[in-house]
Amino acid sequence: MIELEGLSKRYGEKVAVSSLTFTVRPGIVTGFLGPNGAGKSTTMRMMLGLDRPTAGDVRIDGRHYADLKDPLKYIGALLDAKAVHGGRSAYNHLLCLAQSNGIPNSRVHEVLDTVGLSAVAKKKAKGFSLGMGQRLGIAGALLGDPRILMFDEPVNGLDPEGIHWIRNLMKSLAAQGRTVFVSSHLMSEMALTAEHLVVIGQGRLLADTSMAEFIRQNSRAYVRIRTPQRERLLDVLHGAGITVVETGSGALEVDAGKPERIGELAAQHQIVLHELSPQQASLEEAFMQLTAESVEYHAHSDTALPHQWGDGWERG
Amino acid sequence: MSTPQPPMPQAAPDWQAAAGSAYPTYTSPIPVVRTHLGHAVASEWTKIRSVRSTMWTLGVFVLLVVGIGLLAALVISANASESDLSGENPLSFGFFGLLIGSMCIITLGVLTTASEYGTGMIRTTMTACPSRGRVLTAKAIVFFLVAFVVTLVSASLVALADVAILDGSRQPSGGEWFKATIGVSLYMALLGLLSLVLGSIIRHSAGAITIMIGVLLAPLVIALFMFSSSLEKVREALFEYSIPNQLSVFYSTSLSESGPSGWDPLWIALGVTAVALGCAFALLEKRDV
């Protein structure tokens, strides 16, 4: 269990993280979501005692990170796949980590096997692809067989098979009763793995809710209508007490309306419809709506926001 | 790249239920160990021996110290007559190789700390061992021992060879033997340790190496060009306290009669390194990784 209480971090004038309070519970995968630059990585570094909080407190199973004597057995973290000396082999990299925590050497072979790097164990990390580097980082996180696991953007650079693998890995780790905390800027990815969701934007907590609740609240259902007799339809719908939103593209949108009822009304008044379709806003859209105010780096274009956040604009 | 599925036991059925109830906990079969400095030292030893830059810098160091030391003795024995050598301490010809070789020790010292900042490895290291002071202490111990042993072996080899080659010179005393082997090795290891500490403070390999080479050579070079007589005192101090001159004190062949003598260079190096180490510890605790 990880508990954050009023955790804040300022770099000079710039506030990176502002009084975050939430708890990461064991037994489930908790997604940590936010646009690039929202403060996800800073928060994770503070959890691991790498950065000192300006204010607030963070505890790992009730203790400060610095007080953990063999921290790799409590919490395994993948922060950055490149946090490796390129000249060292995968085996030696893991060996020096194991030794610092008094973990038996046999564990190194076990985790190399788990992540599928046994064949390249003696190869230098510098020759690894991004995906292999990510696997090596995950091996390091699993080394101490810890109760808490923390992954910062683990699917970055992985191929579809690797992504599938890590999703299953995270779920099975949580199923064993471990705490799994994973950050991402991709809502769609989180929807597939996380059961609980913590959303931040510009360092502030925007949501701390279960995934099911988030989907229920944020995925807006509406009905899209196209008709050549716009004005008549608008009058009819108004008359029936249905609120209509006119969109730029000439279509009409009705929130929480039933397509059957609208179709019946149109037929009654002999209005021609070209389209009558129930729509569901995607989670990605819901996430963007939630964080719209707090996105730090807007791409300036006349079209709508891009539908997916590009990878690696800036460290989250 | 193809990978096997993780051999994790799939205990899927109860994970939904577990979420709502009292928190389940996972207990690892790996025994909990109260880690201490010994663990950190073992880890740092693995680190230093598992990168090629260590082998390179130390290999070049041994080559320079032994090669130049032997070359100096051979050239002198070929050109000097018996009478030229009679008053000479044959050990003193090991000086040249060590002076040039010190660059390698400086480089290795800086890389031991600063390269972790360059590669990002430091975040992994500090996550595995949150006691930052322990990490720096372990690095210092491992590096100091490596640098001391390697210097001692090379310097002793050169000393033995030089005494054998220059048989016309006087027999060095026991004290002279001690200073030219153990003494210089301690001094070189301290110089490397200072570089390691500077690497931890600067956090940038190239920057720290440049500064250390400047510290090594600048005072001597500046003093060379101080022609004004009003600067005579400064010039003398720069000469006497320059690292090359302090190193030569171990062979009792100082540039001047005043200034550091005997074991003074070692105490000076010890003092400077201790102060720098104190700063590095304080900064390590204060700064974010």
Image (tube, coloured by chain):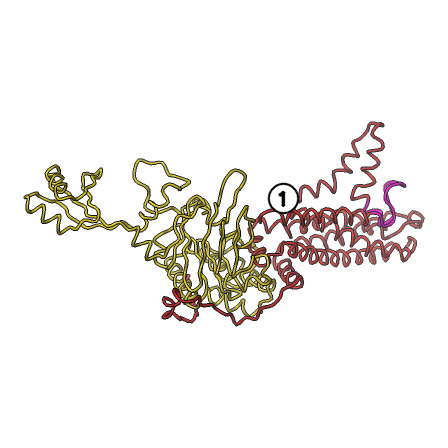
Chain colours: A yellow, B red
Q: Please state which of residues B59 and A143 is positioned toward the viewer in this rendering.
A: A143
The kind of residue on which mark 1 rests is Ala
Magenta range is B246-264
User: Could you say which quadrant of the image residue B59 lies in?
Assistant: bottom right
Left or right, residue A313 beside residue A254 = right
Left or right, residue B286 beside residue A311 = right
Identify the chain of the residue marked 1, using the numbered disc in the image: B
**Where does the image place residue B26, in percent across and percent down from the top left?**
48, 68
Q: Please state which of residues B156 and B240 is positioned toward the viewer in this rendering.
A: B240
Q: Does the magenta stretch mainly form a helix, a strand or a loop?
A: loop
**Where does the image place residue B34, in percent across and percent down from the top left?**
62, 66
What residue sits 32% from the left and 57% below the top? A212
**Where does the image place residue B188, in percent across and percent down from the top left?**
76, 51
How busy is the neighbourhood of tag 1: few (under 14 within 10 Å), some, or many (20 plus)? Answer: some
**Does residue B108 appear anywhere in the picture?**
yes
Q: Is residue B132 magenta?
A: no
Q: Please state which of residues A205 and B35 is positioned toward the viewer in this rendering.
A: A205
- State the SS at label 1: helix
Judging by the rendered image, the residue that carries numbered circle 1 is B206
Q: Is residue B34 above or below residue B230?
A: below
**Where does the image place residue A77, in percent across and percent down from the top left?**
50, 58
